[in-house]
Image (cartoon, grey):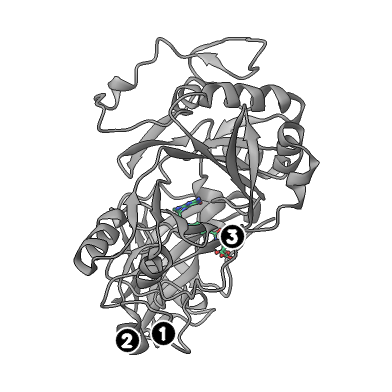
Amino acid sequence: MIFGGLPGKVHDNAMNHQTRDFAMRDITTTMPLTVRMRRSPFWARSHAAGAQGYIVYNNMLIATGFACGEEDYRHLKSAVQLWDVGCERQIEISGPDAARLVQMSTPRDISKMVDDQCFYIPTVDRRGYMTNDPVLLRLDEDRYWVSIADSDLILYYKGLAAGLGLDVSVHEPQVAPLGIQGPKADELAARIWGAQVKDIRFFRHARVDVNGTPMVLARSGYSVQGGYELYFEGETGGDILWDQLMEAGRDLDVCAGCPCQAERVEAGLLSYLSDITPDMTPFEAGLGRFCDMERDPGCLGWDALQAKQTPTRQIRPIEIAGDPLPPQGTFWPVEAEGQRVGRISSSCRAYDFDCNAAIGLIDASHWEPGTAVQVHTPAGMREAEIKEKFWGKF
Ligand code: THG
């Protein structure tokens, strides 16, 4: 059990060994309640399990932690967690022009995608600037889900569809992904859906039966510990599935969790509007490997990107010296010889590597691995070094 020290009394329910009675704890102490902060079918269970804070993402609440940062991190790396990531909204694009419309938004060639495939795609505007970094799912040749990060990308698709008179439907379906993340995720998913789910390859998906309804289960997720995302459809029944997973995974120490800042920063998983901002190209974001620049696949920003293929600043892993740092609420300036050479957008204590790991956007003059720089942190000026690679799995 990883939730030692939390307020609230233990509710030793046979269905769910880790649910605690948080009925007395009112989220309105930190956030006024309103329907505009939408909540997924898993929110009530996730909240009852002890979510300690939330941010708003795609107009939905997403938890930011359950135990202390280090406990959440160690548990994610050793067991399995259920993540209410319903805020990863789906834009469903269907109809004869669906592939064409999706392709207009990304330089990654989607023409060879197969029906059970997922692609991580940079999406760009006509000038080649990042509008989002979604996971794209191909459901069939004329039906896609664009699983978005935090921006109103749906309006771009609706605008293009209307302006160009495309034969497509663009809408946001009632779909809320549930992350099943961690090294024991395979075992847990197999207990619920059968051993064949272990054969789903990375960034592929299959249909599984969820209490009578077929739903998409993909091998993907915002961690590098392995696992799945179940694209849960509908507004009810999330609590039933949650309880089934908790019960089936009791001996695997399954717990509620959420994307873990320390684990994702040390692995170099980027976050749109933190690490990637709307003034950046995919090349600056280090996402050039997801851009097909040999010939234009039909992306509206492709010509602009051609001219921007050699960036003058780029995302880099950075190690910041010294003790653990406070949480990051602003960009921290990066300097060399008193001149600004970049910014830190995300940082963490990389517990397994006993250092402060960070994601920075660094000018070409100082981005070589081994370069010494200084970072203005709320805890004072710190020495730092550009690294060759992110730290990743331990
Ligand atoms: N899952 C789903 N939708 C999402 C996210 C998610 N939408 C928003 C946000 N997260 C998108 N961000 C990422 C970032 C990285 C990865 C997935 C989503 C990722 N990247 C691998 C990498 O970079 O090595 C693999 C990329 C690939 O090979 O295609 O997994 O978490 N549903």
Specify which label sits upstream in the sequence, 3 or 1. 3
Residues 218 and 29: in front is 218
Q: Determine which residue is flagged by label 3.
A: 115
Three-letter code, disc 2:
Asp
Residue depicted at 33% across the width and 90% down the height: 307
Quick one: quadrant of the C terminus?
A: bottom right
Whole-percent x and y of residue 354? 61, 54
> Could you tell me if the residues under marks 2 and 1 are in contact, i.e. CB atoms within 8 Å?
yes
Residue 14: quadrant of the picture:
top right
Label 2 Cα neighbours within 10 Å, binned few <14 / some 14-19 / many ≥20 = some
Specify which label sits upstream in the sequence, 2 or 3. 3
Q: Determine which residue is flagged by label 2.
A: 303
- Whether residue 1 is visible, yes or no, is no
Whole-percent x and y of residue 256? 57, 30
Q: Is residue 338 left or right of residue 221?
A: left
Residue depicted at 35% across the width and 16% down the height: 26
Q: CA distance from mark 2 to mark 1?
A: 8 Å
Residues 282 and 295: in front is 295
Specify which label sits upstream in the sequence, 2 or 1. 1
Q: CA distance from mark 3 to mark 1?
A: 22 Å
Q: Determine which residue is flagged by label 1.
A: 296
Q: Secondary structure at mark 1?
A: loop
Three-letter code, disc 1:
Asp
Task: Residue lying at the far left in this picture: please name it.
Answer: 163
